[in-house]
Amino acid sequence: MTGGDAVAYAMKQINPEVVSAYPITPQTPIIEGFSKYYADGEVDTELIDVESEHSAMSLCIGASAAGARVMTASSSQGLAYMFEVIYAAAGLRLPIIMNVGNRALSAPINIHCDHSDTFPLRESGWLQVYNENVQEVYDTNFIGLRIAEKVNLPIMIMQDGFYTTHSVQEFNTLKDSDVKTFIGKPPKRDTLFNKKITMGSFALQDSYYETRIQLHRAMESARDVIPLVQKEFAKSFNRKYDLFEAYKIDDAEYVVVVVNSTAGIIRKSVDSLRKSGKRIGMLKIRFFRPFPYKEIRHLLAGKRVLVLDRNTSFGSELSPLATEIKASVDVDLVNVVFGLGGRDFYQEDADKVLAKFLRNQIKKFEFYGYRDDLEF
């Protein structure tokens, strides 16, 4: 299946009570696929079509506040249109599951992959997990659901637009009965209908600050919950996940940091360089929120680090991913931005960048793979 089809299938197996979304490339196949399961009577879900992404998230908030298990999906400008209510979902502590097909933000209009749509939402209070391939994104829907419902925070489950959403890959599915056993019934939580609580109230100077601290503590509590849920998943299905993947790092002098689908070609470059005696490894970040700064600190200490980021931060000397790494550990770090707007990054590109890295020929911050025949 494609990544979009795999998510739709995972959603069918989860059978959420409410799904609301608005079509946007490259997310559309997710809800389009799920709507076929809905039309064929394979789910009991209330599937609600709305007039915009803002309305979709608003509806998800209302349904989750009422106690429903809720899922949605979006991309790019859709996330930007949701911006106001994305923050509300986290502030109200609602475990909404949103699958995202990463896509560049306009202007100019672009429908292809980079990570400029989700990295800006790293401060929203949502859990964020980035996935390399179809298998990961399929499994993460079940893992992410459990985590979100344990800490009462919404979660974004990312995959690269077109590279994963529309790429056909082999992967192993789970039995419906095993999925039901693993996700279980939604745990009891305070809702509008089972407890006298207020949601969406007005908070002034005497109380707003405390709500932010509560949200921060909830995100910190996820650090303990994530490994427990992933260990349970590994025990049940023999597929192991972590906050990150440390690939051949233990004895490495050089480490490349990356997220999502690009990890596949970087892994091949690392393997090739290892055969020629180069001590290089890869760190693939999966959970970007909460960021595993404590866990990676000892892994990267004393090593030379290259951060490859499919996103940039205008006016900053480092990209968002590089900023997080630099804040986690004081290392000799260089930063390369690549692939904006879906610019392809092939195996030969990865080999070329890593070769320059090993020769210490990369500046502290630089762009790779842009056309020099256009006026600047």
Image (tube, rainbow, N blue to C red):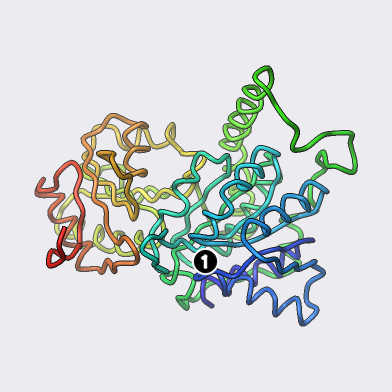
* Mark 1 surroundings: few (<14), some (14-19) or many (≥20) residues within 10 A: many
Q: In the image, residue 8 lies at what x, y percent?
A: 63, 71
In screen coordinates, is 365 left or right of 131?
left
Q: Which residue is drawn at 51% across and 39% down?
A: 123
Residue name at image x 58 percent, y 57 percent: 140
Residue located at (31% from left, 34% from top): 326
Residue displayed at 65% across by 61% down: 72
Where does the C terminus fall, quadrant-wise? bottom left
The percent coordinates of residue 4 (x first, y second) are 55, 71
Say if 45 sits above or below 150 in the image.
below
At which x and y percent is residue 95?
A: 69, 47
Task: Name the residue type under label 1.
Answer: Gln
Is 117 in front, or is 292? 117
* Image quadrant in which you'd find residue 343: bottom left
Q: Among all residues in the image, which is located at the extreme top?
A: 206
- Observer-nearest of 190 and 238: 190
Q: In this view, does 282 lie to the left or right of 84?
A: left
Question: Could you tell me which quadrant the N terminus lies in?
Answer: bottom right
> Within the image, what quadrant is residue 338 found in?
bottom left
Residue with the mark numbered 1: 135
Depicted 182 relative to depicted 84: above or below: below
Dot 1: element? helix
Which is nearer the eye, 140 or 50? 50
62 or 259, nearer to the observer: 62
Tell me where residue 317 sits by quadrant: top left
Disc tally is 1
Image position, residue 200 (x, y; %): 74, 37
Against 49, residue 62 (above or below) is: above
